[in-house]
Amino acid sequence: MQEVNYKQQAYDQLHQDADKILQLIKVQMDNLTMPQCPLYEEVLDTQMFGLSREVDFAVKVGLIDREVGKVLLSSLEKELSKLHDAFTNV
Amino acid sequence: MQEVNYKQQAYDQLHQDADKILQLIKVQMDNLTMPQCPLYEEVLDTQMFGLSREVDFAVKVGLIDREVGKVLLSSLEKELSKLHDAFTNV
């Protein structure tokens, strides 16, 4: 039972953290910080690095499957890229 | 039982990752990359940020106590600082 809880909590936490990155980038865009800005790129790279470390950790501890982690990161990247395109095409 | 395993594995993994940072910095020093080098600072900052994200994640999922996480990070910082001093005082 407890095992399932840790796995579920790890999964939920990773998704929350991914959402947080998405929200952060949305706020940056709403405030008209251009995606071409080096600071934007740096913030995004740093956040993605942090999340990928969390995913690696969860995989190594056995809380999520490596494949699930990959899908989480690539989905976030796709969403960010869509957001980026929507912003630059306005 | 499984609960203890996840907690133990999380604890061990965090310590392994902290050790990895220490080793990385030792290798840099052995290869005479000066601690004043901006790249050294950047590598160290990035690695510490990654580890602190792992710790935060483990705390939020309930795998380690916040206090244990803080001690892990501050111990690593102390060790790195000792290493830094030893290197710069040669």
Image: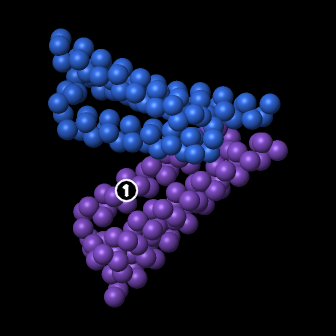
Chain colours: A blue, B purple
Q: Is residue B65 visible?
A: no
A11 vs A90, left or right, is right
Q: Residues within 10 Å of mark 1 (few under 14, many from 20)?
A: few
The percent position of residue A67, horizontal first and vertical second, equals: 51, 31
**Residue positioned 65% across, 54% down in the render:** B11
**Residue positioned 57% across, 45% down in the render:** A60
- The mark total stands at 1
Q: Amino acid at mark 1?
A: Asp
Taking B6 as reference, is A9 above or below it?
above
**Residue positioned 45% across, 38% down in the render:** A51
A30 vs A76, left or right, is left
Which of these two is toward me, B69 or B18? B18
Instruction: Give the quadrant of the N terminus of chain A.
Output: top right
Which of these two is toward me, B14 or A60? A60
What chain does mark 1 sit on? Answer: B
For numbered disc 1, what is the local secondary structure? helix
Q: Residue furthest top?
A: A90
Which of these two is toward me, B3 or B54? B3
The percent position of residue B34, horizontal first and vertical second, equals: 27, 74
Instruction: Give the quadrant of the C terminus of chain A.
Output: top left
The percent position of residue A55, horizontal first and vertical second, equals: 51, 38
Residue for badge 1: B45
The quadrant where residue A38 appears: top left
